[in-house]
Amino acid sequence: MANYLFCRNIDQLSLIGSSAVKQHPDPINIWSISVENQLRHITRLEGVLTPEEKAQAARYHQKKDMLQFIVTRAALRFLLAEVISCRPEEVNIITAAGHHKPQLSGKTGIYFNISHSNQRAVIAIGTGEIGIDLEYVQPDFEYLSVAEFAFSAMESDSLLRHENPLKEFFRLWTRKEAFLKGLGTGLINDLKLINCLDNENIIPAHVAGVKADWAVTTVELIPDYLMSIAHEQLPAVKQINLNTDEDLFTRSYKSDFSF
């Protein structure tokens, strides 16, 4: 029996406060974080990272990339700490054998994924497998060369017919990335095999990690930033909520990171 990937566009996500994680366990919650807005807290942010995470940050050649990693990873720790009721420093994030995405240690039933682009990050948390991808729509990006090896014939046709082919490229690309990140099995050899056009697309039987139908929702998060969130359709996701970094960090800093 074939599994399907259902893709859709929406105009906007529901905007709610960060406390919704505990109040509504079924929806997927997404945080949009401006790295620049959090740099005034960078010393305290770095303080919640593990020695391994600090070493990983230090390996970045460009300072902006290092700061982006620190802010994003620390924010992830704050959010997961709220969900599992511990301090950010105590969150145990691992990468299991055979997987390419980090996860919480133990059987928590909590899943998460992160993405960042051009000094903005997004973090998704839910109760089922999820993947998220954020891309800045770079005006001078050479998208045709990427589409040549990554897009199916139908996707390429959609790209060429679209009134804004650059934005259409990033719409399709973020869908592919989010879906593959959700599976956690890494990139497949032939990206053309996964169609991410609107509505239903058959998932090839040999794509590893597929156990159910999947859905991908694409939205323009803010002007020139496209985001796609992928999740297993079973159990059905009732709602996708958007939270801002101001909700998270204003509250957590005032309470010394105790949720």
Image (spheres, grey):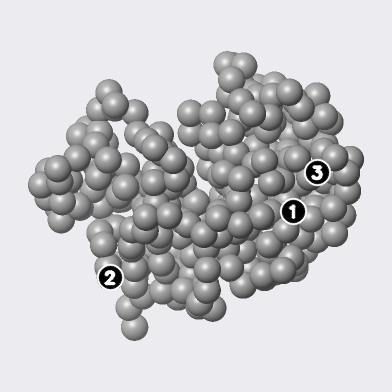
Residue at 74%, 34% in the rendered image = 53
Q: Depth check: 123 or 191 in front?
A: 123
Relative to 197, residue 139 above or below? above
Where's residue 133, x and y in %? 46, 46
Q: Which residue is identified by label 3?
A: 252
Position of residue 67 measured from the top left corner of the image (x, y, whole percent): 65, 24
- CB of mark 3 within 8 Å of CB of mark 2? no
Look at label 1 and name its amino acid. Answer: Leu
Residue at the spot of label 1: 80
| CA gap, disc 2 and disc 1 | 33 Å
Task: Tell me whether the residue at label 2 lies in contact with that at label 1, contact meaning CB atoms closer than 8 angstroms.
Answer: no
Query: Does any portion of residue 192 appear in the rendered image?
Result: yes
Sequence-wise first label, 2 or 1: 1
Q: Amino acid at mark 3?
A: Ser
- Disc 1 on helix, strand or loop? helix
The residue sitting at the bottom extreme is: 1
